[in-house]
Image (cartoon, helix red, strand yellow):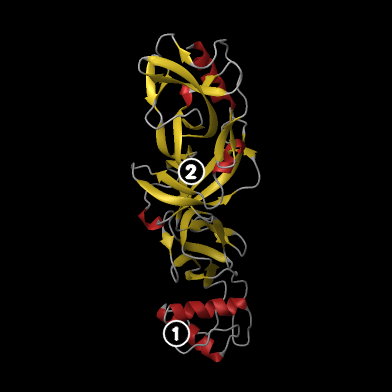
Amino acid sequence: MRRRTAVVSTVVALLAVTGGGIAVTALADAGGTQDAGHRNEGLPPATAPVERGDLSSGTQVDGTLGYAKERKVNAGTAGTLTWSAEAGSTIRRDGRLYEVDGVPVRLMYGTEPMYRTLKPGAKGNDVRQLEENLVALGYGAGLAVDDTYTDGTAAAVKRWQQAHDRERTGRVGPDQVSFQPSAVRVKSTGATVGDQVAPGRPVLATTGSERVVRVRLDVAEAGTAKKGTKVTVTLPDGSTAGGKVSAVGRTAKPGDDPSDKTPKIPVTITFDDPRKVGGFDQSPVTVHLTGETREDVLSVPVNALLALPGGGFGVQVVDGGRTREVEVELGMFGQGRVEVRGGGLREGAKVGVPKT
């Protein structure tokens, strides 16, 4: 069985990821001069069946549970920070983010920042964003949502201000509203209550409210994590959740481990149902990448492979107390098995493997 040991060692050393699967790049001839065919030597120490079924080239990697879309919330006005949302809290539309000189700055949804004071006559996408929020909050009855700040917009703003016990000016600016793309989760505070803040200086560090997983893959494994690839994540409590690869970085950098300088690609995974995902921020998780799947193929354990004297690879078939070497063509590797074709192999046949 020395040939099998040598071959298996070489297989393991020279596996290389290619696209969604794994292929052997080279294997050394491990010795032996007898021809393939019936053998009179002793039986192998153990056998394994040839199996028919679906074979996946998926892989398993460590990841970190976190939140999406890290952003900074900058102060919209100068003064003393008198209150701020706590780390770990989730703020939704119309919720308080922080207060300056006792005046709350509330969250409204929008991709364009609140950079000016809006009043009658103003035009722009920030006006549209404000109107969309006023309608969603129930203050914009009869309000036409467009790019123009009208008297109707001012009236809706006054209703919103009155509901929050603010002066009914009909005008609104960065001292009252902060536009963010969606609900946010406070990751950390950038200033302490009592600090002096000013426009452009960070007050809060936030993330999106939806959970994501971040992993760093070796460059050689990046092909298994294309955008849209299905994954299964094992969470800290042992439960699992489905998801998919949502983003793959384009720049390879060494990981955080100083002993491992292998270039790695950042990958972000989103969940199919984020609401069902629990666990502390930055908790370790395990990600199972589906990879490529070959349907209805024959496969044998990788350690059943033999290097044949004339080149190529084979397996040792055990039948009726006798053994014979059968040359096979290798296909995809995955889950500790390899797809094999040729040699008249059939499902259920026994092949020799090292003793387990």
Image x and y of residue 109, in percent: 51, 70
Where disc 1 sits, the SS reads helix
Name the front one of labels 2 and 1. 2
Position in image of residue 302 (x %, y %): 48, 26
Query: What residue sits right under mark 2 in the picture?
Result: 293
Q: What label does residue 159 carry, if any?
A: 1
Q: Position of residue 203 (x, y in %)?
A: 54, 59
Q: Residue at x 40, y 19 (%)?
A: 318
Would residue 188 be seen by someone viewing this image from the given angle? yes
Residue 71 at x, y = what percent?
55, 57
274 or 28: nearer the viewer? 28
Type of the residue with mark 1: Arg
Give the secondary structure at mark 2: strand
> Which kind of residue does numbered mark 2 sit on?
Thr
* Cα distance between the residues tagged 2 and 1: 58 Å
Q: Which mark is residue 179?
A: none
Q: Quadrant of residue 201?
A: bottom right
From the viewer's perspective, tell me whether residue 112 is left or right of residue 323: right
Which residue is painted at 64% across and 39% down in the image?
253
